[in-house]
């Protein structure tokens, strides 16, 4: 399980982080990045705290976190699966691959398994089209993946 998930927010740590940026202008994105790094995602109460402490309207903070895809508002899995849905991967069976991963994990794209082991995301191109269809798990690339290989690949990431 992600070490930062379901433990609640460490208020001391949050205070420390905000304190560091409190008087800096243009610090909203860096502070959000640090909070996410510390907690694994951006729990709602951290955004409210930042809004109060830094005197930034909550609506503006929501605007930023929903605009940038780097920010997450819900806990993510220990392993992040990025399955390519680009053209090269699509024509080489990307759709069947996605269906297989969804079936094996019991989640749909954009979701996280209940044990927080895996989050499944789709991306437009992983930049390795010559290996299509491609799946990336954390920092590892798997090329020319067939639905039959999915279970073995995922197995490698289960402790
Ligand atoms: S389209 Fe899948 S890696 Fe480029």
Image (tube, rainbow, N blue to C red):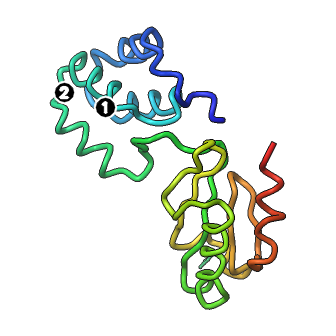
Q: Place residue 128 in its image quadrant.
A: bottom right
Coordinates of residue 6 in the picture (x, y in percent): 52, 28
Coordinates of residue 10 in the picture (x, y in percent): 47, 15
Residue at 45% x, 20% y: name it: 9
Coordinates of residue 92 in the picture (x, y in percent): 67, 88
Q: Where does the N terminus fall, quadrant-wise? A: top right
Please say if 144 is above or below 158: below
Packing grade of label 1 (10 A; few <14, some 14-19, many >=20) is some
Q: Where does the C terminus fall, quadrant-wise? A: top right
Coordinates of residue 103 in the picture (x, y in percent): 64, 68
Q: Viewed as shown, does residue 146 lie left or right of 120?
A: right
**Which mark, by number, is residue 111?**
none
Q: Label 1, on which residue?
A: 28
Q: Label 2, on which residue?
A: 56
Q: CB atoms at circles 2 and 1 under 8 Å apart?
A: yes
Residue at 32% x, 25% y: name it: 45
Check mark 1 vs ligand 1: CB closer than 8 Å? yes or no: no
Asked which secondary structure carries label 2, the reply is loop
Residue at 50% x, 40% y: name it: 75
Please say if 28 is above or below 135: above
Q: Place residue 132 in its image quadrant.
A: bottom right
- Marks 2/1: CA distance? 9 Å
Please say if 112 is above or below 85: above
Mark 2 / mark 1, whichever is N-terminal: 1
Q: Viewed as shown, does residue 31 lie left or right of 59?
A: right
């Amino acid at each position: 399980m992600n070490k930062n998930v379901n433990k609640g927010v460490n208020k001391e740590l949050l205070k420390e982080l905000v304190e560091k940026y409190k008087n800096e202008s243009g610090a909203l994105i860096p502070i959000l990045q640090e909070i996410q790094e510390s907690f694994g995602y951006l729990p709602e109460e951290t955004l409210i705290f930042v809004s109060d402490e830094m005197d930034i309207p909550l609506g503006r903070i929501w605007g930023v976190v929903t605009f940038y895809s780097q920010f997450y508002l819900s806990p993510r899995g220990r392993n992040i699966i990025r399955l390519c849905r680009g053209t090269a991967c699509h024509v080489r069976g990307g759709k069947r691959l996605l269906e297989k991963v969804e079936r094996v994990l019991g989640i749909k794209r954009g979701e996280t398994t209940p044990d927080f082991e895996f989050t499944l995301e789709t991306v437009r191109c992983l930049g390795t089209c010559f290996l299509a269809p491609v799946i990336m798990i954390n920092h590892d690339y798997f090329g020319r993946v067939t639905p039959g290989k999915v279970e073995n690949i995922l197995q490698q990431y289960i402790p």
